[in-house]
Amino acid sequence: MSKYETVEKGAKNSPSYSLYFKNKCGNVISPMHDIPLYANEEKTIYNMVVEVPRWTNAKMEISLKTPMNPIKQDIKKGKLRFVANCFPHKGYIWNYGALPQTWENPDHIEPSTGCKGDNDPIDVIEIGYRVAKRGDVMQVKVLGTIALIDEGETDWKIIAIDVNDPLASKVNDISDVDQYFPGLLRATVEWFKIYKIPDGKPENQFAFNGDAKNAEFATSIIAETHKFWQTLINQSSVGDHSISCTNITNRNSEFVVPKEDADKLFAEAPEGGQVEEEVDTVDTWHFIHLK
């Protein structure tokens, strides 16, 4: 049985839609601040919050600005954002989400990439066989990472697998991915290079020539971003003040609130909303030629 449940507020396919998280006691929690980074620290098993299930197009993400950080759909030019299908891919090609209690510090220049952090929790792509549900909290094993450089910022993409996947016991590092998932790493780099091109943006760039770093390297990056998050959650003088750090479990945090206050924030979240018609993006295929 899961330790967490999700509750929807607002109409689907509207800017008001939000997916809130509750713990097993029924208390409203922040998926960024109240879900622990580690599911099992001794075995280096992490919690992953699934924002976008595989094969879907809606650009869902933990809302940094909204108190209690529900999952909401990104809005671009006043419209709900959907990721384009770039042949031969359909939507996201893995379960996509974030590691809780991490923060890529925009005031820190990462030595290995020469670029600052992107001001978000660290992203995760989960490569197992199961198509997850939005809001699932999966226990994952880290296999490696790639480093997208997005408009001059380091945007790590941690590569992981659900510990309950049938192949989880066989894949322990990035070198195992090509053996058991041939072609996936190459397709992953291609996907990130081209997915914004249909929106008129240039091809994305990567550090390390797009090569993936191993599990040990990825684990060190996660540990670093966890330390950055600790300073963010505990000190009001740190970080971007547009990030809501409201939480119910971090006792040393300046932003911790009583459970009743968190429940009130949930109760005040908007219902209904203006439902938008589904855009052609979710069905259209774009044929992209890289230079």
Image (cartoon, rainbow, N blue to C red):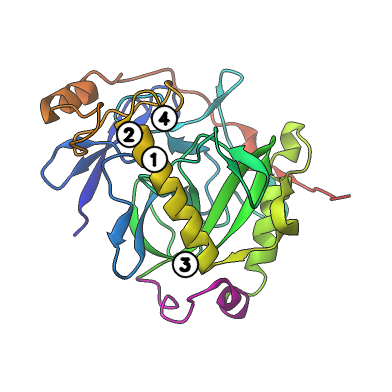
Q: Crowding at label 3, few (<14), some or many (≥20) Cα neighbours within 10 Å?
A: many
Amino acid type at mark 2? Ile
Quick one: SS at disc 1?
helix
Of badges 3 and 1, nearer the viewer stands 1
Location of mark 1 (residue): 229
The CA span between labels 2 and 1 is: 6 Å
Location of mark 2 (residue): 233
Quadrant for the N terminus in the image: bottom left
Residue under the image location 77 percent in, 43 percent down = 203
Amino acid type at mark 4? Leu
Q: Which region shows up in magenta?
A: 164-180
Q: Position of residue 274 (x, y in %)?
A: 43, 17
Q: Position of residue 131 (x, y in %)?
A: 44, 59
The reply to whether discs 2 and 1 touch (Cβ–Cβ < 8 Å) is: yes
Location of mark 3 (residue): 128
Amino acid type at mark 3? Gly
Q: Position of residue 85 (x, y in %)?
A: 66, 46
Quick one: SS at disc 4?
loop
The reply to whether discs 3 and 2 touch (Cβ–Cβ < 8 Å) is: no
Q: Upstream in the sequence, badge 3 or badge 4?
A: 4
Work out whether 91 lies above or below 264.
below
Residue under the image location 54 percent in, 63 percent down = 217
Location of mark 4 (residue): 64
